[in-house]
Image (cartoon, rainbow, N blue to C red):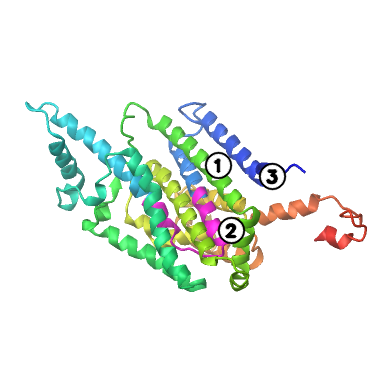
Amino acid sequence: MQRKPFILQNPSTLIVLAGLAVFTVAVTALSQAYGTGALPTSMVKVLGKTLCLALAAVAMDLVWGYLGILSLGQMAFFALGGYMIGQWLMYARTEAIVAASMANNAIPPTPLELQEGVANQIFGVVGSADLPLVWSFAHSLPLQMLLVLAVPGLLALVFGWLAFRSRVNGVYLSILTQAMTLALALWLFQNDSGFRGNNGLSGLQNIPGLDTVSQARLSVWFLWASAVALGLGYLLAAWVVSGKFGSVIRAIRDDETRVRFLGYPVEGFKLVVFTLAAMITAIAGALYYPQAGIINPAELAPIASIYLAVWVAIGGRGRLYGAVIGAVVVSLLSSWFTGGRAPDLSLPFYTIKWVDWWLVALGLSFVLVTLFAPRGIAGLFDWLGRAVSPRRQGRDLGPDHGALQEQEAKA
């Protein structure tokens, strides 16, 4: 019997990819650069960043929903991806500015003088004029793109190997991932970290070599790139959780001791998924921060990773499309409420200003979903699927006439 293609075995994946394509085309048609102009450039950027957050949520669901590890350090990988691409963006833009200022010199500047000028421009704000070692490859876009994957992947590999070989599980592992994030943030806050301390990297929305391209057009280009990354990342995650590999990581989530007793290398499976999720999250960060325009150590605050977990829980843990739905819905609502666009709610005794109360509402939503709807928003699709499923009325379910019956049809 001929085996069906992977995409046909997973119709939900096909639906998500189709919905993503329709969404991208619709936003492009409404944009100021290529469409009617109904959507302002700022909103296009918000939607592009939302797609990046959805990709990070997919990676989070891969680790938490399918493997059972509540990682509170995913945003560390997200920020590292942003820092790696931000180095090239800032170096290349500054190099162009310095080269233009030195063009009128009687003697053309040497490569060393040009590098010293760039270092002084970038690090003068933190009282330094030397280019740190961590910026050794900042002049090369291909090398920095390689570091987008290599640095977070290596951090996840080393951390995971140390934690998993020690068989740290449950809440203790979550605390360790949060401690890793906090330690990295505190190191980046220092001026001698090589990443400009609290100032971070700024001006990332100005893409070198594209000075003549408007922000309206750049925002749509980044939207396309974010949509492609989300589609490919979702497809990869769906492929990982399918088949035997997916069955094993689900079994590890449900009963790790039994899986180890059966002879499976549990630590190896954990390490592969944890490292892969870190690299996917880093790609999301590398696309997010050029749209945001700035990155600093505050982006690594542990609360950011908790937000990511909340999005996945509200959307539906253990369902990749649930992670996408949760990230998109909650992040857009957050932008609306915290941006001052939501009208205040006037009560007889108090006026609720959503800018101040949004986090309370989000926390309450998380608690209610955990208690009363553990499958999240994605559970609605499960309910609809059961509601429209055909009733077999006790007909045979297999070649064996005793295989029946209505009980199996309801299972």
x and y, in percent, of residue 180 in the image: 38, 65
Q: Which mark is residue 11?
A: 3
Q: Residue at x 69, y 44 (%)?
A: 11
Quarter occupied by residue 73: bottom left
Query: Which residues fall within the magenta stretch?
Result: 55-80
Residue type, label 1? Gly
Q: Does the magenta portion include 16?
A: no
Answer with mark 3 or mark 2, whichever residue precedes in sequence. Answer: 3
Q: Tag 1 or tag 2, which sits nearer the N-term? A: 1
Residue at label 2? 314
CA–CA distance between discs 2 and 1?
21 Å
Label number found at residue 71: none
First in sequence, mark 1 or 3: give its number: 3
Residue 411 position (above or below residue 202): below
The quarter in which the N terminus is drawn is top right
Distance between the alpha carbons at the discs numbered 3 and 2: 22 Å
Q: Which residue is mark 1?
A: 231
